[in-house]
Amino acid sequence: MPEVPSLLPLAICVVPAVLAILAYPLARLSRPLGPVLNLLGAGAALVLSVLLMVHAVQGRVLVSLSRELRADALSALLVLAISGVALATAIYAFPYMRLQPLLDRVSHAAGEDVTRRRLAGFYALSLAFLTTMLWACLTNNIIMLYVAVEASTIASGLLVAFYWDRRSLEAAYKYLLLLTVGIAFALFGCVLLYASAAPYISGEGGVRGMLITDLAQVAVHIRPGIALLIISFFIVGFGTKAGIAPFHPWLPDAHAEAPSTISALLSGVMIKMAIYALARTLLIFFPVAAYSPVSLFLIVLAAFTMLLGGVMCLAQDDLKRMLAYSSVSQIGYIVLGIGLAGVGFGHSAGYLGGYGGLFHLLNHALCKATLFLAVGAIIYCMAGTRRMSELGGLARRMPVTAVMFFIAAFAISGMPPFNGFWSKLTLYLAAAKAELWWALAIAVLTSVLTLIAFIRAGYLVFWNDGNGQANEIEVRDAPLAMAIPMGILAALCVVIGLYPQLVHPLLDPAARVLASVF
């Protein structure tokens, strides 16, 4: 594809970064400016992302800063998903971050003055988090890819610790410790890759030796044993960030203790950014990554991840922890698609696997963001309660939230006529074409477990009268500013389910980026 110089990739990174710098001091001066700047940053990123996707659909690859930033169809798809979910959470945060029981939680732990500072910091860090995710998906520099992923860990780790009490600090410490150690393996892979490839790049490497596109051209000269070691480092490093089992222990605590808007970003798009980093680095090694052992290893990891996450969902009483384990399960489907793209190289299973994986990446971003926002609405209206055993009978008092929850729950379970059905069906077909019947069976079984877990959660929270706090609190449905982003995301789940061809122009060029290399 032709590379076209453009300032658009740079603007996508710079606009939210500038607003992140301004957000803290301005929010300290005037509290309403914090959510406004957060909304402006996410909205601007979405508008620019749509423009970027238009170029990608037309077959153009945009580059900035001497190809340090590079946006092809795969990058554009991720940037669009990230900015879209970020905008939804920015709107949602207007009423949610004013919820008194949640602010009291910070005040009890750190004092009233700290609460005001942490609210200002929340919006600045949210924009910084958005910036790092966008940067990771647009950089063409292998070292800067690691730096962007690590920067997203620091920004999101501070957001996980927002409440500043024992639970949130423990979750943030675990999150930062495990991810920093895990992602260090990705750094080892980046350094080893540069050292191995630089001699084969004109000018003895230098900056060009760090460009992913240039590394891909000389990867064939790297000895297979070294290449396999580099790939192993990338799988462990970026796999930890993505929450692939068995590298996932940080995920349930971080998702559960973060504010619900941040949980939606963590589960909806951050782990997808890590999957993108993994796929992008594996694409460098087409001659090795297409070997069946490497691709089959990814499929085995995917199957284990799917099954473990699905089983653990059934054992949770905390709604947010249940959704976190569901994310572990669903990330397995996306990894399955990447693995199938390698196993099916040279025939339709490869394209179907990549297409299905990317389709599920998009669908899961919509579904899981909706679910976390719906649970956030329950927390908002139930004064912080999120245990299923303490809830019940909310369908009558929170009908809008209940509808959103069930739409997203059925969608993520792969039920027609919602969007998750089509992405999972595509993955099933790819596994069948590759004759990996055991992987197909595990994928179908995991969907059944997911459906059971969400039916159980829906019954306990919305239908069961129960004996918990729900009967003792006067409950009204979520305010309009929270219902609108939930409604838009849920509507997209339905619309894409009824008309999946609408997203084909977005997915097809991105899948061909995978298929052209794998």
Image (tube, rainbow, N blue to C red):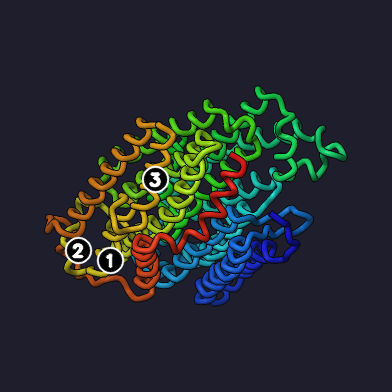
Between discs 3 and 1, the one toward the N terminus: 3
- Residue 395 in the image: x percent, y percent? 19, 65
Checking the image for residue 401, the label placed there is 1
Q: Is label 2 in contact with label 3 (beta carbons under 8 Å)? A: no
Residue 442 vertical position relative to residue 364 in the rendered view, above or below: above
Mark sitting earlier along the chain (2/3): 3
Check disc 2 and give the amino acid type.
Leu
* Extreme residue toward the top, this view: 225
Judged by depth in the image, the label closer to the viewer, 3 or 1, is 3
User: Residue 317 at what x, y percent from top left?
Assistant: 25, 46
> For the residues carrying marks 1 and 2, which lies nearer the camera in this image?
1
Identify the residue at horizontal 35%, vertical 46% (top origin): 326
According to the picture, the residue beneath numbered tag 3 turns out to be 330
Callouts 1 and 2 close, C-beta under 8 Å: yes
Q: Is residue 174 something that shows in the picture?
A: no
Q: What number is the disc on residue 394? A: 2
Circle 2 packing at 10 Å, graded few (<14), some (14-19), many (20+), is: many
* Snapshot quadrant of residue 493: bottom left
Pick whichever of labels 1 and 2 is earlier in the sequence: 2
- Secondary structure, mark 1, is helix
Decide: is 45 above or below 515.
below
Closer to the camera, 267 or 2?
A: 2
Task: Give the image quarter of residue 138.
Answer: bottom right
Alpha carbon of mark 1 to alpha carbon of mark 2: how far? 9 Å
What secondary structure is found at the residue carrying circle 3? helix
Task: Classify 10 Å Cα crowding around label 3: few (below 14), some (14-19), many (20 and above).
Answer: many
**Gap in angstroms between the C-alphas marked 2 and 3:** 27 Å
Residue 359 percent across, percent down from the top left:
45, 52
Which residue is pictured at 34% across the width and 71% down the height? 483
On the image, the x and y values in percent for residue 433 come to 42, 37
**CA separation in Å, label 3 and label 1:** 22 Å
